[in-house]
Amino acid sequence: MKTFAKLFRSIYACAFILIVLALASRSALAEQKEVFGDYEIHYIALPTTILDPDVATRYELPRSKSTGFVNISVLKKQEDGSLRAVSAFIRGKVNNPVQQSRDLEFRRINEGEALYQIAEFWYSQGEVLTFQLEIQADPNQGPFSLRFNQELFPE
């Protein structure tokens, strides 16, 4: 029974990642990543309405035309040149066009080899949001600063 539950969780994790990737390509977004030395920070912000209801429930994301989520993955280059997902401390905020600021509360999702962090936020249709993040992947180094803009429209 544990094997079935593990497989079921993995299927949901893969579905979530595939949905995010499919929507990124469907929205004609270029790959959104920044490279900081040996680290790659992959990021995307999307409306929660794009999520399948079961996936939204699994990740405790309310599906709403005014709720979005930001997904951050931190990958570290290994000695053999491959990339491996690593844990990171992420703090940030999102600003709307009139500079109203909201703190983002990230939570870590660890599904096998996949490791990412998500935070939800409120938005109004068509507004351009500015995300400002501090990402600390190594406690012995200072954080990386990441800033990006995203315009959101519910599905």
Image (spheres, grey):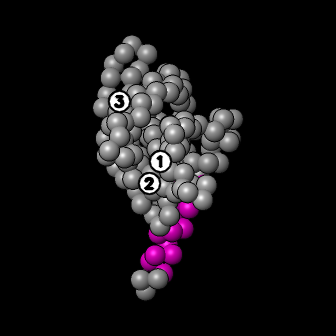
The location of residue 37, given as percent across then percent down, is 51, 39
On the rendered image, what quadrant is the N terminus found in?
A: bottom left
> Does 45 sit above or below residue 110?
above
Q: Sequence-wise, which precedes: disc 3 or disc 2?
A: 2
Residue 113 shown left or right of residue 61 in the figure: right
What's the mark number on residue 116?
A: none
Tags 3 and 1 touching, CB below 8 Å: no
Q: Looking at this view, is 72 or 88 the one in front? A: 88
Whether the magenta-drawn stretch holds residue 145 is answered as no
Amino acid on which the number 3 mark rests in the picture: Lys
Q: Looking at this view, is 101 or 81 the one in front? A: 81
Q: CA distance from mark 3 to mark 1?
A: 18 Å
* Residue on which the image places disc 1: 74
What's the mark number on residue 86?
A: 2
Q: Which region shows up in magenta? A: 4-18
Q: Sequence-wise, which precedes: disc 3 or disc 1?
A: 1
Q: Sequence-wise, which precedes: disc 1 or disc 2?
A: 1
- Label 3: state its secondary structure: strand
- Label 2: state its secondary structure: loop
- Label 1: few (<14), some (14–19) or many (≥20) C-alpha neighbours in 10 Å: many
> Does 83 sit above or below residue 33?
below
The location of residue 94, given as percent across then percent down, is 38, 28
* Residue on which the image places disc 3: 93
Residue at 49%, 55% (x, y): give it.
85
Asked if residue 98 shows in the view, the reply is yes
